[in-house]
Image (cartoon, rainbow, N blue to C red):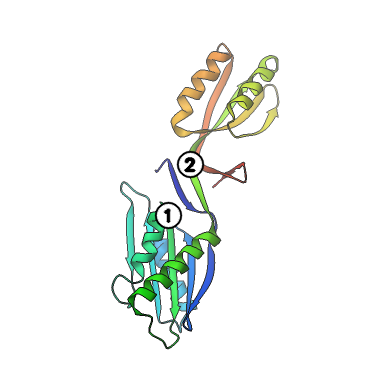
């Protein structure tokens, strides 16, 4: 699993028109090639009258997997400009499809590169880009006597937290970047002289949106 990467926050669709040709830029979050194939099949069905459905995508893995297709447009005029947008923003697990309805006027290679690139960029802008990071979802358990100290340390660290749970003891839920989990546990344990119990519940992807932590 990639520990940190940029991807689309939402799916999105935009339109660009050039010399009566309509280009529909569509951005999707995807995580597998199977999802890519399903989306492409659905779009071909949705846009039955389209002349081309050109696309590019990048998927996480031991190495980033990249694919692009001109779908009948002159070589290098459609899929590659779309892929260049994904590469330029370092987007992973993202698919962009640009559907073209031909308007009767040839655009030339330069015009096609510009149109497909512009449609891809506008689709990205509409979808929004967020940085996803792998976090450890952790619980810090302590007694009431030191709960104030633990809460202070967590707030000072600036790490995302959820509301504390008060039962026989106090449970503070905190999200810690995966590479910092061990160091975080050691620091809190040392600060509280071992009077805490720390559990890593799961690993989750999250990111900061409008200044707030959200699970992704």
From the image, which quarter does the N terminus lie in?
top left
Q: Which one is nearer the viewer's eye here, 149 or 128?
A: 128
Q: Which one is nearer the viewer's eye here, 162 or 11?
A: 11
**Quick one: which residue is furthest to the bottom in this view?**
104
Residue 198, position in %: x, y? 54, 23
Q: Is residue 111 above or below residue 207?
A: below
Check residue 205 in the rendering and tell me which mark sits there, or answer none.
none
Check residue 133 in the rendering and tell me which mark sits there, or answer none.
2
Q: Which residue shows up at 47% across the image and 63% down it? A: 121
At label 1, counting other C-alpha atoms closer than 10 Å, the crowd grade (few under 14, some 14-19, many 20 or more) is many
Residue 158 lies in quadrant: top right
Q: Which residue shows up at 49% across the image and 45% down it? A: 132
Q: Which residue shows up at 53% across the image and 60% down it? A: 125
Q: What element carries label 2?
A: strand
Residue 204, position in %: x, y? 51, 41
Residue 105 lies in quadrant: bottom left
Label located before the other in sequence (1 or 2): 1
**Quick one: which residue is furthest to the top in this view?**
193
Q: In this view, does 142 lie to the left or right of 21?
A: right
Residue 164, position in %: x, y? 68, 30
Q: Which residue shows up at 57% across the image and 14% down it? A: 191
**Quick one: which residue is furthest to the left in this view?**
75
Residue 67, position in %: x, y? 33, 62
Return the residue at label 1: 93
Q: What element carries label 1?
A: loop
């Amino acid at each position: 699993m990639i520990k940190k990467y940029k991807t689309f926050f939402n799916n999105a669709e935009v339109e660009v028109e050039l010399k009566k040709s309509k280009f529909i830029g569509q951005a999707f979050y995807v995580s597998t090639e199977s999802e890519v194939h399903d989306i492409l099949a659905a779009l071909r069905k949705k846009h039955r009258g389209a002349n081309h459905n050109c696309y590019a995508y990048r998927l996480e893995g031991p190495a980033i997997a990249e694919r692009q297709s001109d779908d009948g447009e002159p070589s290098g005029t459609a899929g590659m400009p779309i892929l260049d947008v994904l590469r330029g923003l370092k987007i992973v697990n993202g698919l962009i499809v640009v559907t073209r309805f031909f308007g009767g006027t040839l655009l030339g290679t330069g015009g096609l590169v510009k149109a497909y690139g512009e449609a891809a960029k506008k689709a990205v802008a509409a979808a929004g880009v967020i940085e996803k990071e792998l976090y450890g979802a952790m619980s810090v358990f302590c007694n009431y006597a030191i709960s104030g100290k633990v809460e202070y340390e967590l707030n000072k660290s600036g790490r995302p937290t959820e509301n504390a749970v008060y039962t026989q003891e106090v449970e503070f839920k905190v999200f810690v970047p995966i590479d910092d989990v061990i160091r975080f546990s050691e620091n809190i344990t040392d600060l509280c002289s071992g009077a805490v119990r720390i559990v890593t519940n799961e690993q989750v992807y999250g990111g900061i949106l409008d200044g707030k932590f959200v699970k992704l």
